[in-house]
Image: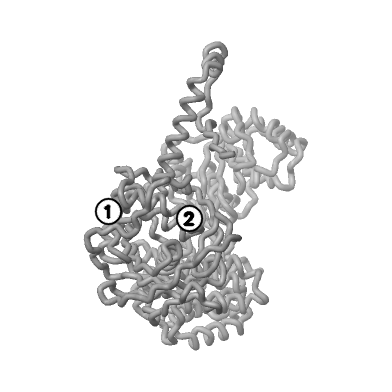
Amino acid sequence: MSYQVLARKWRPRSFREMVGQTHVLRALINALDNQRLHHAYLFTGTRGVGKTTIARIIAKCLNCETGISSTPCGQCSVCREIDEGRFVDLIEVDAASRTKVEDTRELLDNVQYAPTRGRFKVYLIDEVHMLSSHSFNALLKTLEEPPPHVKFLLATTDPQKLPVTILSRCLQFALKNMPPERVVEHLAHVLGQEQIPFDEDALWLLGRAADGSMRDAMSLTDQAIAFGDGKVSAADVRSMLGTLDHGQVYEILEALLDADARALLDAIRQLAAQGPDWGGVLAEMLNVLHRVAIAQLLPDAVDNGQGDREPVLALAQALPAEDVQFYYQMGLVGRRDLPLAPDPRSGFEMVMLRMLAFRPADSTAAPRTPLKLSGISPATPDSPARPVASTQPEREPARLASVQPLRDSQPEPEPEPATPSADTPPAAVATGGEVVEKIDLPWHEPPVSAPVAAERPLEPVIAADHQASVVLVEEPDDEEPPLTDEDYFQVETQAEAYLDAFQEERLDPDVQAEPALAAQPASGLAAEWIALLSQLGLGGLTGSIAANCTLAAVDGDHWLLHLDPDHSALFNATQQRRIGEALNGYHGRSLQLDIQLVKPQQETPAQAAARKRLERQRSAEASIQGDPLVQQLMTQFSAVIREGTIEPIEHIEP
């Protein structure tokens, strides 16, 4: 006797033997038991989910000799003939091979004749979406009003290609893909009945490889039985499918968890012996990390769809949540960049090494090998910088200003003021013996003819935790140097309180880059700072920091600036030093500068510039709207002024 493949041998012959598709079976069973039968049914779904099988069972239910019901006997001649594929009143049509309109017309010519043996003549048209448009048109009328002894059962894997006129004439049932759990359960039952030994892990591999198709799962099982010489083992199935061992993925993740570079490279070396698809390996890792993230958020939501629920839960408890998110994001980027690597294995190794080297710094399991810290780190004080006279003949490399409390600082020797030469351009400022070109910034306004009382005696300045003793130094050029770890310092408690107070404002998406106008206009020292800033020649990021400061107090050579915390994200010791150098160059002596993160109570230079721009804009709009010609156009021709199209004309001095 010839061998019958498992997919045909174990094809369901009744609704009770069907696996899954409960939502479809319930409607069909109720309709058959209550005799509420439609004349046309459409079954949709991917390959191997039971479309044709359900259609054949319906044909048996309609024509069984015991009567119309959802439980055909399976023993009568009609049931046996349908199971054997030789029932004369069940006409199965492969629409993929009979697409012409002539084939459809020939099929419909016999619709009017009564069935030969059964109660109904059943037309089962498989892959109906392959019919031509003329064939669909020829089928429309008959499909809408067939004779009472005719039933149409249509099946397709691509319902989007069906005309709406066909869809509206049928009852539609969408069959779902088979989940791996259901496939594994059914395979275990079949192999148990066939008395074939198997490993449960092998069934999970087959269930995932089937990709939702029960027929594919049965065919792969047949292949696995032949490959394993009568048994189904995980090693044989893995070798047959060329799939990755999930255990090796967990070995890589455990090596990352332990920050063990040797174990990580050993796991990759063992993996390379199988010649895997490295992009597929990364995809498997991302899949595992996704399940781990779900397990950390909601453990009950983790299913056993891949047969690894317990390892996922264990990894979720051991791996910090921030590491999971970091590894997942880095794996996504690495998978995208993998084709750019010299070879796939080296690209995969680099992704793993990046995961190992750049894990979050506050992770509970730090790498065993000390790694170089990256990003922002707490600064350590430099050695005290010595003052450099403005007349120094030789150029020295720029150095950072030392950070020390004001009360502990010692007075620095005053450098000799720089004397501008006759050739010095007017738009330049002497800084440390060099001529620095003044750059006009958006907030620069024409100088205000107001005296600058830089040494106005005020109340003593209260020293903060971080003060800067600014000395006059030379810079190799006017470019911003690269920032170092020492450029950053931790924000003080006082500043953190202000940042918390204004956090909601900063997170508001409606907040624009334009600085908010101050509650009070500038006066006294604040107004003097606005006039002074335009003469310091600060540009770039340093100029932006200075423009969002206000002068709070001056006590001899001790200056206190308040910086708006909303604009302090990029503030560091380098910016403070540059502002101090500009003040030293302007006044011709060494000053001690302190910049604190405090919300200014009066206008900063940036806010003053913004207020003036707003005033000019409003004046320009009022001028246009009050122009007689514009008013005439609006009155006679219903003209409107488009919002945002009026711009003030900047005054250009002769």
Query: What is the x, y in percent for residue 190?
Result: 50, 68
Query: What is the x, y in percent for residue 148?
Result: 57, 30
Query: What is the x, y in percent for residue 368?
Result: 41, 86
Query: What is the x, y in percent for residue 500?
Result: 28, 56
Side of 70 relative to 92 (left or right) = left
Instruction: Report the residue at 32% width, 52% height from top.
Output: 525
Side of 129 relative to 187 (left or right) = right
Badge 2, how many Cα within 10 Å: few under 14, some, many 20+? some
Residue nearest the observer in this picture, 95 or 423:
423
The reply to whether residue 152 is visible in this rendering is yes
* Type of amino acid under label 1: Ala
State the quadrant of the N terminus. bottom right
Q: Secondary structure at mark 2?
A: loop
Furthest residue in direction top, as rendered: 636
> Residue 18, labelled with which disc?
2
The vertical placement of 70 against 256, above or below, is: above
| Distance from the alpha carbon under mark 1 to that under mark 2 | 63 Å
Residues at discs 1 and 2 in contact (Cβ within 8 Å):
no
Residue nearest the observer in this picture, 374 or 17:
374
Q: Which residue is mark 1?
A: 501
> Residue 446, labelled with which disc?
none
* Type of amino acid under label 2: Met
Residue nearest the observer in this picture, 346 or 139:
346
Q: Secondary structure at mark 1?
A: helix
Label 1 vs 2, first from the N-terminus: 2
Side of 470 relative to 89 (left or right) = left
Instruction: Report the residue at 41% width, 37% height from top.
Output: 34
Instruction: Report the residue at 54% width, 67% height from top.
Output: 434
